[in-house]
Amino acid sequence: MTVIDEERVVVEVKGLTVERLHAWVRRGWVRPTLGEAGPVYCELDIARCELVRQLRDDMDLDRDTLSLVLSLTDQIYGLRRELRRTLRAIEQLPGEHRQLLADRLRAAENILDGDH
Amino acid sequence: MAKSLYEVLGVDAKASGKEIKSAYRKLAKKLHPDLNPGDKTLEERFKEISAAYSILGDTDKRGQYDRGEIDESGAEKPQYDSYRGFADRDEAHQYHSSTGYRDFEDLSDLFAEAMRQRARSEGGGEFTGDAGRNRGSGRAAFKMRGGDIGYHLAVDFLDAVKGATKRVTMPDGVTLDISIPPGIAEGQSLRLRGKGQPGFNGGPPGDAIVAIEIRPHRFFARDGRDILLELPITVYEAILGGKVGVPTVSGRVQVTVPKGSSSGRTLRLKGKGVPAKGGKPAGDQLIRLKIMMPDDIEPDLEELARKWRDGHGYDPRRELEQ
């Protein structure tokens, strides 16, 4: 993993200053790793900073709303990860088990359809 | 001809700077690909509106565009990597939150186990420095739990049913007594805490995950918590009934074969299967009868059968009539 110091982060992300970055870290919007010589960042953190910048500057979200959006976003990505893991595990099951599962899912959908 | 940048943002060519900003803001909120990770088509549209805004949102560039000094192609498409691309990588779970599904633990054993593993592999990271306001995981500068190592262990049928202790030697030469719980099933795994790879920077070691394979038995088979046995009986035991000795996983018992039993009849020995454990009741032993002829059909048996046939014929195949 490429290790990036905060000066580089500030250069990479338009409209970011060191003070601003520190404020984002304090609010928990960005979470660097604590290295021996201070916080270090990776490409994921830079993309995260870019997202925060867009939410704050381009979309003009206030701080509380931004925290809420990030929290929901993190939940979505967490769910996406679980869903991916689950689907990957299902893919490894024998064909008849996958078929059984597909049938069950379809059956569950049919029950919902009956309510319409 | 390409859409004008004004059309991309859906504003009038005479729109004020404020109107343009507001139009962009509305579209960006709706189309942002990182906030709609499942929709791959949004990314291009979002780039398009961002590019349009990079010109129209800038008074000087907008003037150049209006005078025809630059055209749509002068709009720079943003080159940054989307957050989604990183966040969707499994190893990048630094920001992932389990809050959206933590309650699934009540719903399914599958999720409960997956979540315990998640908690171990993610919660394993622990800052060595001032961790007060930072929470994260999985990165080199702090304590990290070691990885799990997968092993394989073949267990005798009866040991899997009744439970046992197996002595094994790990790759580092250390011997371990593994306790096999009664009723373990093929494909289940045992976790040996701390027997995996060593941790990093003083973090705890991972676990050894031992997948269990059950060796088949000479005459017993298993269906969940029940033990299956095919029991050969003589012709006269089938006709007259009587007590016969039957092996079970817990020793020999006497079983009464009912008078007039056919092959395939199944007798149930309550509680003689996998022992009860942790709220699960004991399984049963299911005995399936199988009538065996004597090795030689002697003349008097043949004579008896012929005589009996002529006076008392019956049709066991009447169910098969079409």
Image (spheres, coloured by chain):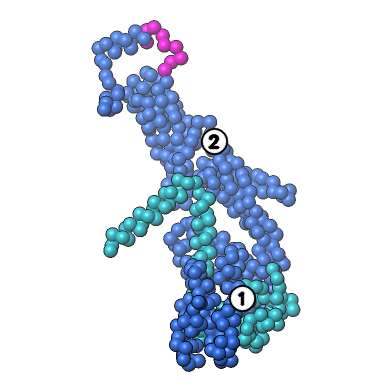
Q: Amino acid at mark 2?
A: Pro
Quarter of the image that includes the C terminus of chain B: top left
- Mark 2 lies on residue: B216
**Percent x, y of residue B146:** 67, 61
- Rendering quarter of residue B77: bottom right
- Rendering quarter of residue B201: bottom right
At a point 36% along the width and 22% down the height, the residue shown is B238
Residue B127 visible: no
Counting other residues with Cα less than 10 Å from the Cα at mark 1, is it few (<14), some (14-19), or many (20 or more)? few
- Mark 2 and mark 1 lie on one chain; the one further toward the N terminus is 1
**Percent x, y of residue B203:** 68, 65
At a point 37% along the width and 18% down the height, the residue shown is B236
Q: Amino acid at mark 1?
A: Gln
**Percent x, y of residue B153:** 61, 44
Counting other residues with Cα less than 10 Å from the Cα at mark 2, is it few (<14), some (14-19), or many (20 or more)? few
Q: Which residues are magenta?
A: B293-301
**Percent x, y of residue A52:** 56, 80
In which chain is the residue bearing label 2?
B
